[in-house]
Amino acid sequence: MDVNKIFNLFGSGSENKEIKEEKAVLIDFKDHPAYWLGMFKKLILNHKLFSKKITNFLEQIDPEMDTSEMKESGDYMAYERAWSYIQKFDISEESHKEAINLVIDENLVKTMDYAISYFQELELYERCAHIKKISDEIKKLF
């Protein structure tokens, strides 16, 4: 067994320097409108699924348990976090419109409708208007 061959698998220091320089060139995808749309969709859909599962689980354990407050707080956290992403999206910018094509699907359309309904109940109409503009553009493309 040749120990040098084993350690050569990890590369030399000069190769590590090249890798570090290459990483510096990478773009932070978190600042991209497609990321914002994707996270908005993911947060709402995952919340809906998790909320349904945890509610069913708790009702099986104790059928008399009131899960409405838990659901309200879960909704608040999920939709506020989703809002933190979608509020950055500016439908008047062409690059943002192009980003829609990267993540568009039936679920994105649904999550827009879910969010509008949620914020309507709370009478946060500015948020509804912002999401509605984006939703209308998505529906044109879908």
Image (cartoon, helix red, strand yellow):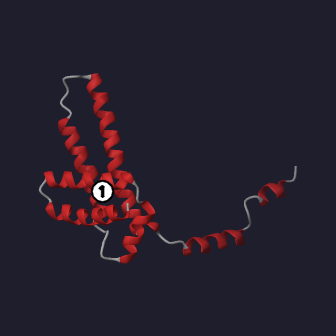
On the image, the x and y values in percent for residue 140 come to 33, 64
Which one is in front, 140 or 18? 140
Residue plotted at (21% across, 33% down)? 67
Residue plotted at (30% across, 36% down)? 52
Circle 1 — which element?
helix
Q: Quadrant of the C terminus?
A: bottom left
Which one is in front, 134 or 54? 134
Extreme-right residue of the structure: 1
Which one is in front, 138 or 74? 138
Residue plotted at (14% across, 59% down)? 124
Count the labels in the image.
1
In the rendered view, tell whether residue 138 sits above or below residue 113.
Answer: below
User: Mark 1 = which residue?
Assistant: 82
Q: Residues within 10 Å of mark 1 (few under 14, many from 20)?
A: many
On the image, the x and y values in percent for residue 55 come to 28, 33
On the image, the x and y values in percent for residue 25 come to 56, 75
Mark 1: amino acid = Ala
Q: Quadrant of residue 6?
A: bottom right
Q: Quadrant of residue 71?
A: top left
Residue plotted at (16% across, 65% down)? 126
Which one is in front, 85 or 137? 137
Extreme-left residue of the structure: 123
- In the picture, measured across the screen, residue 109 lies left or right of residue 2, that is left
Q: Quadrant of residue 69?
A: top left
On the image, the x and y values in percent for residue 132 come to 23, 62
- In the picture, measured across the screen, residue 103 lies left or right of residue 44, that is right
